[in-house]
Amino acid sequence: MHTTERNELKLYRFFLSLPILTIFLLSSCQKPSITFGNSFVPAGNTNIVTYDTSTLQLSTVLLDSFVTAGTGSMLLGRYVDPYFGTITSKTFLQLGTPGKQSVTNIAGFDSIEFVMRLNKTFYADTTVVQRYYVSQLNDVINYPSVTQRSFYNNSTLSYNPVPLGSTDISISPLALHTTQNALDSVKIRLPDTLGQRLLNMFRNNSDTITNLNTFLSYFRGLVVYSDTGASHIGTLLGFKDTAFMRLYYHEPGAATNFKHIDFPFNNKSFQFNNITVDRSSSPLAILKSYQATRPNPLIPAEAPSALTNNAIYVQGISGIQAKVRFPYLSNVLGLQDYIGLLKAQLILKPIEGTFGPELSLAPQIMLSATDQNNELGSPLYYNNSLQTGNLVTDYVYGQNTFYTYDVTSYIKQQLAIGGNNTDGLMLSMPSPSNVTTFNRSVFGDKTNKLYNITLKIYYISLVH
C-alpha cells in the first residue's frame, strides 16, 4: 500500500471515531445522578448534595455529683491538667475480719502493712514519685441518710489527720512494676503498736477479731490519699478494690515458722472515690459562677463555648459533659432543591495539642438525646450498636484524629418537627470508664476552622 493510501485510511478512521469520542466526553462532564423512583419525586433523576454549613451551638455542662461507689476501682493521686484544672482523688474503704485464727501464746509479731494492687489505670506523668498516706476513719462507714443509698464524687468522711503510715513510690503501670520490687503491689507499713494489739487479740480469741460488727467498731475503715505538695503532683493511678491489711508473725520452734494473716476488703459498695477539681486556672473556671448563679439548682450548670476558650470539654470523672445543639436545621428545609434527607454525620475533631500519650483522649464518647434541662435521654445507636465514635488517633501529626457518628435518625426527627428547638445531643463517656478513668477530650467551636465539630448532611436534590 502506498503512503498516500495509508494516510487516507487513517483520516477515514479518525472521522469515523469522532461521534464515539464526543459521546464519551459529554457523558464524563455530566453530574452523576441517581434515580430514586417516585419515593421523592414523581419521576426523573436526582442528585446527592453535601451540606455542612449548618451552625451548631456548643456548650460545656457540669454535673453536681455522680456515683463513685462500687466501681471496682480505687483512684489515687493528683495532677494538673491545663484544660480541666488540678484534679485530686482519694479513696475510702472498709476492711473486714479474717475470723478466728490458730495463733499460739508464744507467737511473735513481725510487722503489719496495707497492700494495694494496680489495675493498669493511670493518667499523666507516672515518672513522678508519689507519696501515699493511709489514715483511719473516725466513724464506721454508713450511708448518710435513708434516701442516699450510695456515695458520690463529693462524698467524704472524717478521718484522723495523723496517718497510720505512708510510702514514697514511682510506678510503671503497664509493666505492673513498682519501685518497691513488689510487682503490681504498693505496700504501706503500718505502726507496730497496731500489729501487736491485733496479734494479742488473735492469741486471746477476742470477739473483736471473730465478730465483724465488733471489729468494724474497733477498726472503722481507712482513707488513702496522696501528698498535695508540688513535688508529688504528677499522676493519678487506679488500684483494684481488693486492698487488704496483712499481719506478719512467726511461731517459734525447731525451725521458725513465718506466717501471716490477711484482713480482707469488706463491702465493696462502701468503697468510693472522692474527686475534687480546682478549675480556677483553667478555661473552665467560669463554670463555678454559672453553677452558683443558675436559677434552678436541679439543672446542671452550662457555659457556652465562647466563654470557655471557644471550646467544649468532656471528662467523666470530673463531671464534665458537652452539649451540641442544631438551632438552624430549618435552613435545610428552606433549600429550594431539597427533597429529603439521605444521611447525616457528626464529626468531632479534638484540638491539636490538647492530647498526647500522657493526657489521653477518651477512647469512647457516646451521644445521648438531651433537652433544655440537660437531662440525658436515649443514647444514639447505629445498626443496634451503641455509637461511641470509632476514634481514629493521630499522635504523630495530631491533625487526623476524629470521632464519627451516624446521626441520620436524630436529624430526621428534628427536621420532622421543624428543625428549631432547644433539644440537642449530650457528649459523655460511657459507663464504667466515666468514673474509673481520667481520659478526656477537647473540641473547638466554629471559630476553630481545623479542629471543631461538624455536621455533614447529605440530601437528595432535584436536578435543574
Image: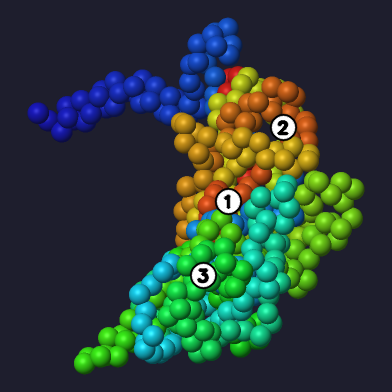
Residue at point 59%, 11% (across, down): 41
* Residue where numbered disc 3 is placed: 207
* Residue where numbered disc 2 is placed: 329
- Judge left or right: residue 377 versus residue 389: right
The N terminus lies in quadrant: top left
- Label 3 residue SS: helix
Q: Are marks 3 and 1 in contact (CB under 8 Å)?
A: no
- Say if 95 sits above or below 23 in the image: below
Residue at point 69%, 28% (across, down): 414
Dot 3 amino acid type: Asp
- Label 1 residue SS: loop
Residue at point 51%, 65% (across, down): 211
* Residue where numbered disc 1 is placed: 429
Residue at point 66%, 59% (across, down): 142
Dot 1 amino acid type: Met
- Work out whether residue 247 or residue 394 is closer to the camera in this orientation and state it: 247
Name the front one of labels 1 and 2. Answer: 1
